[in-house]
Image: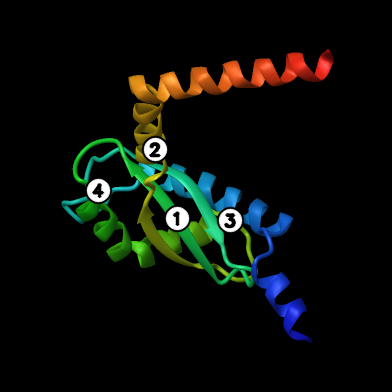
């Protein structure tokens, strides 16, 4: 395998199988967390949303993106990582896979990022700049039609 092929494979988007397995794991973990009776006090009686699961190309590792609906994210994510062996065992009963991936939980910051971008977009100076860009686009379109 030459270097170009290796680099192209490295930046490749997830395969259909990775996406399908990730989605199956996401659904199963959501159900498991909804009904699980955690012994860990950080996790007891909490509502946790599993927003995404990214599975490695060899399907041996899964990164689980979670969003706690209440409480501080850091201790909850740490608790989930402590409970990953238990959750993996429960997952083994819920899904049929040749290899059950190791689970790694991380806080999903995408919603915070969307909120931050929306705040920026609603600033008066940004709205003014966007309006001036729209005006320039309209002038350019009128000139090309003439």
Give the labeled residue for mark 2. Answer: 111
Q: Say if 53 sits above or below 143 in the image.
A: below
Q: Say if 77 sits above or below 111 in the image.
A: below
Residue at 42%, 51% in the rendered image: 65
Q: Nearer the viewer, mark 3 or mark 2?
A: 2
Disc 3 secondary structure class: loop
Disc 4 secondary structure class: helix
Mark number displayed over residue 73: 4
Query: In this image, 29 relative to 71: left or right?
Result: right
Give the labeled residue for mark 1. Answer: 64
Quadrant containing the N terminus is bottom right
Disc 1 secondary structure class: strand
Residues at badges 4 and 2 in contact (C-beta under 8 Å)?
no
Query: In this image, 127 relative to 98: left or right?
Result: left
For marks 3 and 1, give the CA distance: 16 Å
Residues at badges 3 and 1 in contact (C-beta under 8 Å)?
no
Mark 4, other Cα within 10 Å: few <14 / some 14–19 / many ≥20: some
Quadrant containing the C terminus is top right
Residue at 20%, 56% in the rendered image: 40
Residue at 19%, 41% in the rendered image: 71
Residue at 36%, 63% in the rendered image: 84
Q: Say if 116 sits above or below 25 in the image.
A: above
Mark 2, other Cα within 10 Å: few <14 / some 14–19 / many ≥20: few
Give the labeled residue for mark 3. Answer: 95
Say if residue 119 shows up in the picture. Answer: yes
């Amino acid at each position: 395998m030459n270097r170009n092929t290796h680099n192209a494979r490295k930046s490749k988007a997830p395969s259909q199988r990775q996406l399908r397995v990730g989605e199956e794991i996401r659904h199963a973990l959501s159900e498991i967390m909804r009904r699980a009776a955690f012994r860990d006090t950080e996790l007891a009686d909490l509502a946790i949303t599993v927003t995404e699961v990214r599975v490695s190309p060899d399907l041996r590792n899964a990164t689980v993106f979670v969003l706690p609906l209440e409480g501080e994210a850091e201790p909850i994510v740490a608790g989930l990582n402590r409970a990953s062996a238990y959750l993996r065992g429960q997952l083994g009963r819920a899904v049929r896979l040749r290899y059950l991936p190791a689970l790694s939980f991380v806080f999903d910051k995408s919603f915070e990022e969307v909120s931050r971008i929306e705040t920026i977009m609603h600033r008066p100076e940004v709205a003014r700049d966007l309006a001036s860009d729209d005006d320039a686009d309209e002038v350019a379109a009128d000139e090309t039609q003439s």
